[in-house]
Image (cartoon, rainbow, N blue to C red):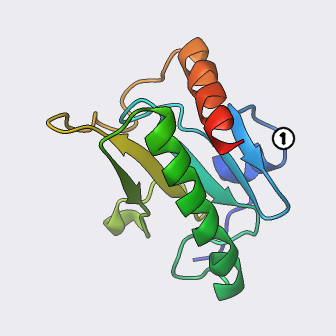
Amino acid sequence: MAYDTSNIFARILRGEIPCHKVYEDADAVVFMDVMPQTAGHTLVVPKAPSRNLLDADPAVLAKIIPLVQKVAVAAKAAFNADGISIAQFNESAGGQTVFHLHFHVMPRYEGQPLQIHARQMEDAAVLAANAEKLKAALA
């Protein structure tokens, strides 16, 4: 299937929809997931258009993976996490719901399961505070 330029992440990248931005460079934007599965659930979204990992340019992936790692290290510190889960889904059957390549970075805690995704929007003040925590850890 072709890349759809009207997907929500493309619209966020164009500035049409606001987000709680944590980091931005020439290649990617990092922002808080508005329906987090855990405190600090963050998305790393390349600016280059691709539906997912299956059609992504390998050069884009080469730039994004180090950023995913950097965000994971910072999130673990910022949210005092015991570990980090990185998730990336491909096509509907693989669990993908937004068809723009992105990586989920989720702080994890021993004995605490993830919340169900896309069930409830987080309070904007909580997202803003979590974004500031992560920004400080990335600095």
Is 103 drawn above or below residue 93 in the view shown? above
The number of numbered badges drawn on the structure is 1
Q: Residue at x 68, y 63 (%)?
A: 4
Q: Position of residue 87 (x, y in %)?
A: 40, 59
Q: Residue at x 43, y 70 (%)?
A: 90
Q: Residue at x 62, y 77 (%)?
A: 61
Q: Is residue 26 left or right of residue 85?
A: right
Q: Is residue 109 left or right of residue 106?
A: left
Is 2 drawn above or below residue 30 in the view shown? below
Q: Position of residue 12 (x, y in %)?
A: 74, 43
Q: Position of residue 93 (x, y in %)?
A: 32, 67
Viewer-side residue, 114 vs 71: 71
Q: Quadrant of residue 115?
A: top left
Query: Farthest residue toward the bottom?
Result: 58
Is 53 drawn above or below residue 85 in the view shown? below
Q: Position of residue 50 (x, y in %)?
A: 66, 72
Disc 1 crowd, CA 10 A, few/some/many (<14, 14-19, 20+): few
Res. 99 in view = no
Determine the secondary structure under disc 1.
Answer: loop
Q: Residue at x 40, y 36 (%)?
A: 118
Q: Is residue 90 left or right of residue 115?
A: right
Q: Amino acid at mark 1?
A: Gly
Q: Quadrant of residue 139?
A: top right
Determine which residue is flagged by label 1: 15
